[in-house]
Amino acid sequence: MKLATDYLGLKLKNPLMVGASPFCDNIDAASRLEDAGASAIVMRSLFEEQIDYEQRALSFLLETPSESFAEATSYFPGYSEYQLTPDHYLRQLGLLKSTLRIPVIASLNGCRPGGWTDYARRLEQAGADAIELNLYQLVTDPCASGLEVEESMRATVRDVVSTVKIPVTVKLSAFHTAPAQFALSLEQAGAKGVVLFNRFYQPDFNLEDLEVEPHLRLSDPAELLLRLRWLAVLSPHLRGSLACSGGVHNREDAIKALLAGAHTVQLVSVLLKQGPKVLTILLEGLRQWMTEHDYSDVGELRGALNLRRCPDPAAHERANYIRILQSWRV
Ligand SMILES: Cc1cc2nc3c(=O)[nH]c(=O)nc-3n(C[C@H](O)[C@H](O)[C@H](O)COP(=O)(O)O)c2cc1C
């Protein structure tokens, strides 16, 4: 049975990889995931703000001190609060590369063009097999248009892509007006793939303290549905690689993501909850399902349920929406 998968031009032994998360902070944890069957691993993100901070701190020391620098950075974690400093990140990447046999993907997190994108070259020099660029941004400026925001993101992608020879993939939010068009435009900007989707960590209100409480809730399988829809829409149109990130917790979830058109399935929450052994269980489950359904190559199921054969996907989606609302009777 063939589970080998091409992802961003990398040859992966199967479609199950570890998504961006703290696992790579610990070489033993990363090795255990490799031993359990992970086909690739993404490091946690290095943030635009961290790299900028370092670059600005240097000019702060060399040039004139400025009050606005302190103010502008006061919302962000202090330099020492990040788990990995930029230098530490490069060293950790080197260690991972010398220990693991599977591809190691570095993650840069930022959405505006700037000097920080040069850091991609250092990640490449440290041995990264690819870069995942996470464009996470919550646009709160009522004067910023979608077009402006997306143009700035595209410019960021172009900057990173032109800095390195290794493949660059882009982790997106689902909340663009026209996600399909935006994803295609990123491919034209040089991205070799997209990762669907970022999760938004939505803060809650604490009614006792009347404060805003940020919290990180791990995902559940309900989050997969949004990914399935957009994988199915995008997979007939993108030439590059599609990764599904969000809500994959069991073998059925992983199979659905592949049927919708994903080349790879990224796992985080399920690994944090159940540990590396779940990877072995998921891979065994995938093999078993493929045998039961007469598939001998994972490539044959990829995209089998996408919207390629649907003559009018927009009408199909709208019709389903209407049908679902009409299905309730009281
Ligand atoms: C503890 C934790 C840390 C994460 N760190 C990052 C990160 O640094 N960069 C990033 O792009 N995504 C990060 N993510 C998001 C995951 O890569 C993934 O997109 C998300 O958890 C959805 O996948 P899941 O349902 O398998 O958890 C993190 C998630 C968790 C739970």
Image (tube, rainbow, N blue to C red):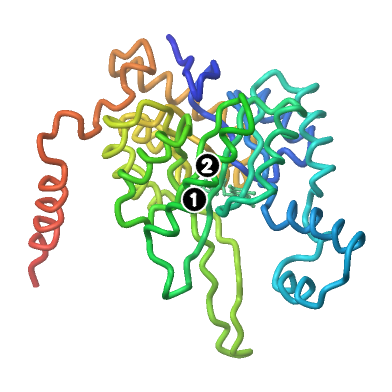
Callout 1: helix, strand or loop? Answer: helix
Q: Split into 4 quadrants, where in the image is the C terminus?
A: bottom left
The residue carrying pointer 1 sits among few (fewer than 14), some (14 to 19) or many (20 or more) residues within 10 Å by Cα, namely many
The residue carrying pointer 2 sits among few (fewer than 14), some (14 to 19) or many (20 or more) residues within 10 Å by Cα, namely many
Q: Which residue is mark 1?
A: 153
Residue type at mark 1? Met
Q: Split into 4 quadrants, where in the image is the N terminus?
A: top left
Considering only vertical position in the picture, is 155 above or below 215?
A: above
Q: Which residue is mark 2?
A: 157
Observer-nearest residue: 153 or 209?
153
Residue 79, image quadrant: bottom right
Horizontal side, residue 84 vs residue 195: left or right: right
User: Which residue shows up at 45% across the image and 58% down it?
Assistant: 149
Observer-nearest residue: 303 or 127?
127
User: Which residue shows up at 36% across the image and 22% down it?
Assistant: 289
User: Which residue shows up at 77% across the image and 29% down it?
Assistant: 126
Residue 299 locus on image (x, y percent): 36, 17
